[in-house]
Amino acid sequence: MYLVDTNFLGTLANVYPRDVFPSLWGELEVALFADGVFFHGQVDKELAAWGAPEYDWYKQHVRQDQIIPPDQEELDLYQQVVEWVVLERQPKYREAAATEFLNVADSWLVASARRYGATIVTNEVPAPDSVKKVKIPDVAAQFSVPCINALEFLRRLNIQI
């Protein structure tokens, strides 16, 4: 099971635009909206706010059962993520960094991936010593949640162009 971060589609759209790489996007249409690939409700909201043409493409293809809403177990795990980011992590994140992380889908992705045993697909890279920016892979590691980048995800989906 994969949970896709907002930045996956954003980076893909910027680096591999649909008009230049139509075969890649055609392959994605099949693989990204297949069983085993999911989007958190907060990612869905971020994609809607993004408003890029790729959002329309996403909305045309995503199934409602691919969008995961939080349940009570996820809410409990989310509270653990919040406590670790704000109170327990050493060295402590700056308040602005923690606030930003908690105000976007990233924190929900970690809780949801932990809840469902999923792998997060993100283009963020670990920065374990950073106090200025909270990175998904660093928080995910604390909760034993695997993360992979876009290229590894495409490999696992057997996408070749």
Image (cartoon, grey):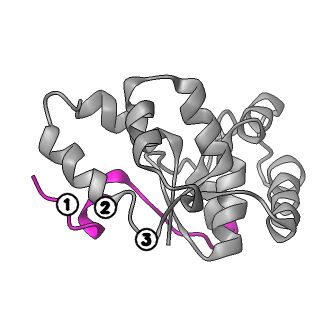
Q: Is residue 156 magenta?
A: yes
How crowded is the residue under tag 2: few (<14 C-alpha within 10 Å), some, or many (20+)?
some
The amino acid type found where label 2 is placed reads Ala
For the record, the magenta segment spans 142-161
Considering the numbered disc 2 on the image, is that residue within a helix, a strand or a loop? helix
Considering the numbered disc 1 on the image, is that residue within a helix, a strand or a loop? loop
The reply to whether discs 1 and 2 touch (Cβ–Cβ < 8 Å) is yes
Q: Up-down: is 88 above or below 113? A: above
Front-most of 15 and 43? Answer: 43
Q: Read off the residue under disc 2.
A: 31
The amino acid type found where label 1 is placed reads Ile
Q: Read off the residue under disc 3.
A: 35
The amino acid type found where label 3 is placed reads Asp
Left or right placement of residue 94 versus residue 112 in this view: right
Q: Read off the residue under disc 1.
A: 159
Q: Up-down: is 13 above or below 29? A: above
Residue 137 in which image quadrant: bottom right
- Residue drawn at 71 percent across, 50 percent down: 107
Considering the numbered disc 3 on the image, is that residue within a helix, a strand or a loop? loop
- Residue drawn at 61 percent across, 56 percent down: 138
Alpha-carbon span between mark 3 and mark 1 = 15 Å
Left or right placement of residue 3 versus residue 149 in this view: right
Front-most of 48 and 5? Answer: 48
- Residue drawn at 43 percent across, 23 percent down: 52
Alpha-carbon span between mark 1 and mark 2 = 8 Å
Task: For marks 1 and 2, give the one nearer the viewer.
Answer: 2
